[in-house]
Amino acid sequence: MSLRDRLTLVAAGVVAVVVVLVSTATYFVMRHELQSQLDGSMRGVARSVQENLGNIPGGPEEDGGSLVEVIDSNGDIQHLNFRGSLPFDPSILDVARGRTSHGFTRDITVHGIRLREVVAPVSDNFSGVVDQAVIVVHSLDEMNRSLDRLRLVLILVSLGGIAVAAAAARLLANAALAPVSRLTAAAERIAQTGEPSERVPEGGAGELARLGHSFNTMLGALEESLETQRRFVADASHELRTPLTSLQTNIDVLRGDVELAPDQRRQLLDDLHRESQEMRALIAGLLELARGGAQLEKQPFQLDELVEESVERARTRFPAVSWEADRIDPTVVDGYRDRMERAVWNLLENAGKWSGDGSAVEVSLEDGELRVRDHGPGFADEDRPLVFDRFYRSAAARAMPGAGLGLAIVREVAEAHGGTVAAENAQGGGALMRLSLNGAARPGSLEKT
């Protein structure tokens, strides 16, 4: 069953319950009212007989169709306004003998006819002793016919009301779910075409309008993600093609029939080793970027220890560079240690590549911010806004090994930890890289927390 059908059914059901309850209450209220009016009329007749026995009407037609009979304490009929007699039982005799001082009212059936009966005591005019009872009986046929007509009218009104409510609920459901239908149609078209460029109207207000806005926001994010994925695949394919082509060329030369001198063969093997290393680094970078936000649970780790270990590694990798790490404050980070280690190493490796022999690289970690400053050429004005883009390499960097993924990985890791990374030209020359983790870093060590 569709949502539209369920809404219609629920609305019609609620209206049906309300209509039935109202109709039932109306029926019983009207029945009580009619019965009260009939009882009042019959008690009036009984009261007039109590006040004056000679006041008995000449016939039922003179008192709205009521039959009146007076019996004594022995059950003998003393007065009546019709031919025949009414049945009586011990309860009526109890009233005539004064045992039930207030009388009673009840429904009885005589020869299959439903009647209303009022029984009241009658006192002797001289002694005031109750020695008789007046019985007033009236047919319930007229009241029952009125109730039957009322019941029929209420049933018809209820059915009509439920039908109208169902139709109105259907119209309201169609109007209310029209935005949902548009969203569904758009989602189906996007699923078929794979192109999330379509947008749905956002007019109106309320929850459905917010749903439309959220849906368009989701489509925009999906479109941007797909475009980023396409660019990533295209760029990765382009970057992988170059080392693969070079590898294939060198392998073909080694497998060829041309005799190579030992020095030439050694040079080709060295080229193959270097290109395979570059390929390995490129694939590792691509995997790092591809996994993006797919992370395990964050764990606390000591960033200062990680930085010190990376600096020691950089001293081994770039022995001609002086690595100065005088200010490394104890810092705890809630995040992903392996990814942060990759990002820190990329910053140090980038600084080492651009530092000449005998140059210095200064590393510091203060207030949740890692700073790496080298004394190389720095950034050109046109390159600085682009250094964190994937596969971007400046003109000067194209002569050096790399695929342009190192700083892009640093930015991905920083954002995964709620931080930022910035590239600046340092005063006095060189580049300054700032990795800020204020949102995830706190001073201290794990042993003290």
Image: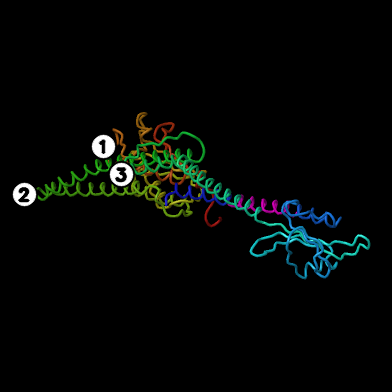
Does the magenta run of residues contain 72?
Answer: no
Dot 1: few (<14), some (14–19), or many (≥20) neighbours within 10 Å? few
Q: Nearer the viewer, mark 3 or mark 2?
A: 3
Left or right: 62 in relation to 182: right
Q: CA distance from mark 1 to mark 2?
A: 32 Å
Residue farthest toward the front in the current orientation of the protein: 83
Q: Which region shows up in magenta?
A: 20-39
Residue under pointer 2: 257
Question: Which residue is labeled 1 in the image?
Answer: 399
Query: Quarter holding the C terminus?
Result: bottom right
Mark 3 or mark 1, which is nearer to you? 3
As drawn, the label of residue 192 is 3
Q: Majority secondary structure of the magenta segment?
A: helix
- The amino acid pointed to by label 3 is Gln
Viewer-proximal residue among 264 and 412: 412
Look at the numbered disc 3 and give the secondary structure of its residue: helix
Picture coordinates of residue 441 (x, y %)? Answer: 50, 47
Q: Is residue 171 visible?
A: yes
Q: How is the image coloured?
A: rainbow
Give the structural element (helix, strand or loop) at label 1. helix
Residue 407 in view here: no
